[in-house]
Amino acid sequence: MDHPETLYTVNGMAVIFANQGKHDKALEWYGRALAGAKKALGVDHPNTLRTVRGMARVFDKQGQYDKALESYWRAFAGTEKAVMSGIDISGHPPMQYTIGKLVDLYARMGQQEQAQRLRLRMAAMTQGLEVTSIDPEIPKKRAGCELGRDGCEGSVSSRRRRRE
């Protein structure tokens, strides 16, 4: 079951079950697809990450928000790594799509501050500005320095000034 076309079909079965609301069955098929994709394609291959995003959507629908967040962040990190490695991700959702899903999830969880940080990050990416970290905890780790605040290392405005 490691052939890419077979994995595509297995992933497709997971999507069908997810669309039917059969979440446990969907996760079972996504699990099969993910195991095969990791082995055949690698953990950061766009098709492997598609499966991770699919699992995140199912976890989200089930209300398993921690698992959904973990999966969306994993998909984002892998996509960013693939882009930085020069892997062609055309035909796959851009990183902004995954951030959009994270923004929505954080907002529904009542974590408006985290959702706002990601909105700023998505805006920076859309404008072609450099975004330096995929870690959602980085703003907390920088002693209160928030993404977008002037004078903070790594803020959108400080990166913009360095480019000018």
Image (spheres, rainbow, N blue to C red):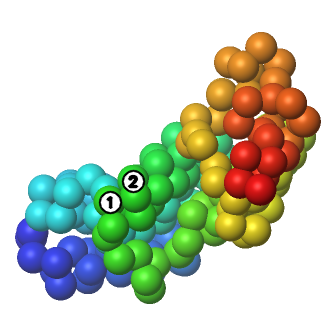
How far across and down, in percent of the image, does residue 151 sit? 86, 30
Q: Look at 13% across and 56% down and name the residue there.
A: 39
Q: Quadrant of the C terminus?
A: bottom right
Q: Residues within 10 Å of mark 1 (few under 14, many from 20)?
A: few
Check contact, mark 2 vs mark 1: CB within 8 A: yes
Q: Position of residue 72 (x, y in %)?
A: 54, 51
> Quarter-wise, where is residue 113 in the image?
top right
Kindly report which numbered mark, 2 or 1, lies closer to the viewer in this rendering. 1
What secondary structure is found at the residue carrying circle 1?
Answer: loop
> Identity of the amino acid at label 2?
Lys
Amino acid type, mark 1: Ser
> In terms of secondary structure, where does tag 2 sit?
helix
- Is 51 placed left or right of 123 in the picture? left
Would you name the residue on which mark 2 appears?
81
Residue drawn at point x = 53 percent, y = 75 percent: 93
How many numbered dots are placed on residues in this image?
A: 2
Please state the horizontal and vertical placement of residue 36, each as a whole percent of the image. Answer: 17, 61
Residue 93 visible to the viewer: yes
Residue at numbered disc 1: 85
Answer with the quarter of the image where residue 126 lies.
bottom right
Q: Say if 65 sits above or below 43 in the image.
A: above
At x 16%, y 78%, the residue is 4
Is 2 or 47 nearer to us in this picture? 47
Frontmost residue, 113 versus 62 = 113
For residue 142, above or below residue 82: above
Marks 2 and 1, Cα distance to the nearest angstrom? 6 Å
Q: Which mark is residue 161?
A: none
